Amino acid sequence: MEEILFRYNPWWEGDSGLSGVHDRPLMIKRMMRYESYRQIVILTGLRRIGKTTLMKLFIQYLIENQRYEPKHILYVSVDDYVLSKYTIIDIVERYRKIHRISSSQKIILFLDEVTYQKDFEIQLKTIVDSYNTKIYASSSSAGFIKRGKKYLTGRNIVIEVAPLDFEEYLQFRGIKLKRSDEHLVDEYFEEYLEYGGVPEYVLTRDGEVIKELIDDIILKDIVAEHGIRDPQVIKDYFLLLMERAGKQISINKVANILDISPDSSRRYLDLFTDTFLISLLSRCGKTNERILSKKKIYCCDTGIRTFYTGLRDKGSLFENYVYIRLKDNDLCYLYKDGIEIDFFTRKGELIEVKYHSKVTEKQLKLFNSVRAKKRFIITSYNDFLELNLS
């Protein structure tokens, strides 16, 4: 085990192991916000979205900017087959012995894909309750985190690692826009809408990256994990979800199209949500309205969506982008007499997204009739940048 741990932690011997890696300062700032908290910080998000790289960037930040002793930081990938015979507690105990770290000395643990370990939640609870330890962990499955909730309630903070936003996309592509390049913003933004923010795809433009990502999610995280007998129906379900992104989805209609039961349709939708591929947006209203009304569906990344549906309906893609960036604001959508307004936040901000187009007369009437703290009509990326939410 000792050799493996040294391989995972090159900073113990003076090497960051991060040559050529792009920084993500906003995500580092979010992680640092909770560094002094007792709770476990769990990084969630899509497969291959950069959770591992983000952990290592944060380790480098702690060593270089916060003056942490490198040997007091342990990173390990819990899904490593070689380590599968050891518990997390075994690994931590062995690590402390290697560096002769007493139980009273603070250590920081980075546990990648922690949900692969059996009883991970009980082990994390034990470590947090018994040792002077700060834990950052990651998982690509919301379902596993939900199952560990009863042990970790009050002991964890969840950060979803989103795909690259437009600014990060430009940074990864090595593009610097000056003030004199303002006329190029829309052109590059539409390029971003096409390729999205999956880091490897942004850098390579190789469609196999997206294909392999989706195949891994469908075959490993959904079909194999949940014992689904017909992989093709899951693939077909996914394609229907991409076609309906930005629209209300009917579980019964999808069930009829795929010749499956409504219960299966509902279950598959939940499984795709658990993998972070899609998000569901409820209709505004009382509790029963939110629960019973049709949900709107959004893809986690515009690049994944356009890979399967093509670059069409830029207005819908822009709405999808705005949703991804704003979804932490507890959004719902307004729907009345067949007229829809895109987003209403928990603090009373009303938002309609119209990419380089105008709001219809009927929409404007509903838009102005709703009691709202603030109102925004967003028609471009620059409008989005000027969005001033409470």
Image (spheres, rainbow, N blue to C red):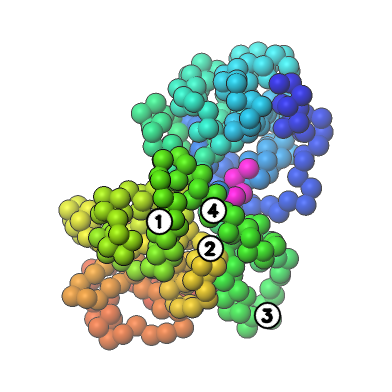
Q: Which residue is mark 2?
A: 304
Q: Residues within 10 Å of mark 4 (few under 14, many from 20)?
A: few
**CB under 8 Å between callouts 3 and 1?**
no
Comparing marks 2 and 4, which lies closer to the viewer? 4
The numbered mark, 3 or 1, whose residue comes first in the sequence reads: 3
Res 290 visible: yes
Q: Which residue is mark 1?
A: 233
- Cα distance between the residues tagged 3 and 2: 28 Å
- Cα distance between the residues tagged 3 and 1: 47 Å
Q: Residue furthest right?
A: 14
Comparing marks 3 and 1, which lies closer to the viewer? 1
- Cα distance between the residues tagged 2 and 1: 19 Å
Magenta segment includes 50: yes
- Dot 4 falls on a residue whose secondary structure is helix
Q: Residue 285 — which label?
A: none
- The image shows residue 115 at horizontal and vertical percentages of 50, 33
Comparing marks 4 and 3, which lies closer to the viewer? 4
Q: Which residue is mark 3?
A: 181
Task: From the viewer's perspective, tell me whether residue 198 is left or right of residue 245.
Answer: right
The numbered mark, 4 or 3, whose residue comes first in the sequence reads: 3
- Cα distance between the residues tagged 4 and 1: 13 Å
The numbered mark, 2 or 4, whose residue comes first in the sequence reads: 4
Magenta residues span: 48-52
Q: Residues within 10 Å of mark 1 (few under 14, many from 20)?
A: some
**CB under 8 Å between callouts 2 and 4?**
no
Number of numbered tags placed on the structure image = 4
Q: Amino acid at mark 2?
A: Ile
Q: Amino acid at mark 4?
A: Asp
